[in-house]
Amino acid sequence: MGGVNDPLASFAALRTDEGRALLESVRDVEPSQELAVATRLRREHPADLVSAALAQARLRQRAVAKFGADAARMFFTPHGVEQSTRTSVATHRARRFCDPVELGGLGVRSVADLCCGIGGDAIALARAGISVLAVDRDPLTCAVARANAEALGLSDLIEVREADVTDVDTSPYDAVFVDPARRGGRGRIFDPEAYSPPLSWAVEAARKAPRAALKIAPGVPHDAVPEEAEAEWISDGSDVKEAVLWFGTDTPAAHRATLLPGGDTLVSPRATMLPDPGVRPVGRFLHEPDGAVIRAHLVAEVAARVEGGLIDETIAYVTSDTAVTTPYATTYEITDQLPFNVKKLKALLRERGVGVLTVKKRGSAVEPEELRRKVKPRGAGSATVFLTRVAGAPTMLVGHPC
């Protein structure tokens, strides 16, 4: 049996009737209240159990951003909260796995989820009706994943196995999903071969399966993408969340940008991707491509849709003369173009009565908050300022969203 400092024993204690009651009682405790609450509860409960309950309550509060209302019923580890996929992204991926149209006419009904963590992806897969083998080598992580499957009523569809993923036979399953660890003792890992397991191992595991998906960092070098894989970059609320390498889809050797929550998706075979659009003078409209589009190197496809060109060969802003909009970029009407000059900008904003100022930047060393402090916006009007380069020159573009 584990001792008082055994994480598995502490977690097991949280799942007893006493532990569950404690968790419920500290659910809404604010950080400033923790000391007083802990002191009071330790008069009636073991100190270790009170500490574990308060720590779990904090993790649940953090997890709401990723798991929504489910977070209140789930269990977490600090690493699990950090590394897990948010529900919207996991649901999108599960839909691609099980949709026969998305995967070339064969819907996936069973998945081996390797490096499953606390079970976020397994939960989304199970909710899509897929049977899941969830594998992780860490005993506590496996215990948490089992508890989450039980808490959400998905135990019949999720089998959690404590094992090294490299020892697991995935041949009985329709598909493989691998989410390698991309954080180490010193923070984020940027070299795909330093993932645990390495990307090369994950790719070979994917190639042996009828269908597969590998979750990777969105900044992965494009030359690390296997020739036969579809590479998908996913954003949620304009914030790029992850990239996925898909094997066995009906769009192999392609780049895809998917924008959640709407689900708009832009895809282009790598062999026919458009060349970079040319640079042209700033027109009446400026289009800011979504981050997933930029990561997928599909800015040229957006430029073609809006009949525009780049404002600078190194900047992912597209300009056009007509108000053609696209879900893959946010469109602004540009009213002013100024060489970078804080005094001139301040005078212009004061003249326009701009008090609500949004500052965006690409290709500028100036921080938005620094500029905001200097221009001191006042008034009832609003505007957006882009700190950028136009044909190599530091420039300020002023406008507003269309």
Image: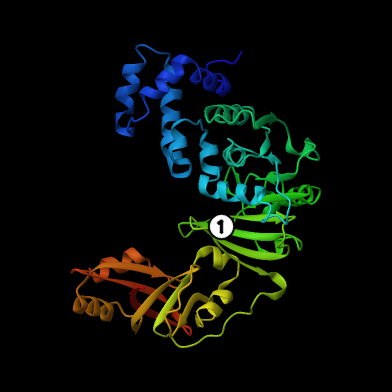
Q: Please, which colouring scheme is shown? A: rainbow
Using the image as rendered, state which of residue 245 and residue 33 is in the foreground: 245
What residue is pinned by disc 1? Answer: 234
Residue 90 visible in the displayed image = yes
- Tell whether 320 sits left or right of 212: left
- Tell whether 215 sits left or right of 89: right
Q: Residue at x 71, y 61 (%)?
A: 225
Helix, strand or loop status at disc 1: strand
The x, y position of residue 147, in whole percent, is 56, 27
Q: Residue at x 81, y 48 (%)?
A: 208
The x, y position of residue 231, in whole percent, is 66, 60
Q: Residues within 10 Å of mark 1 (few under 14, many from 20)?
A: many
Task: Locate the C terminus by quadrant.
Answer: bottom left
- Tell whether 72 sits left or right of 124: left
Using the image as rendered, state which of residue 312 and residue 320 is in the foreground: 320
The x, y position of residue 79, in whole percent, is 54, 38
Name the amino acid type tagged 1: Ile
Q: Quadrant of residue 395?
A: bottom left
Q: Quadrant of residue 7?
A: top right
The x, y position of residue 30, in whole percent, is 32, 33
Using the image as rendered, state which of residue 146 and residue 360 is in the foreground: 146
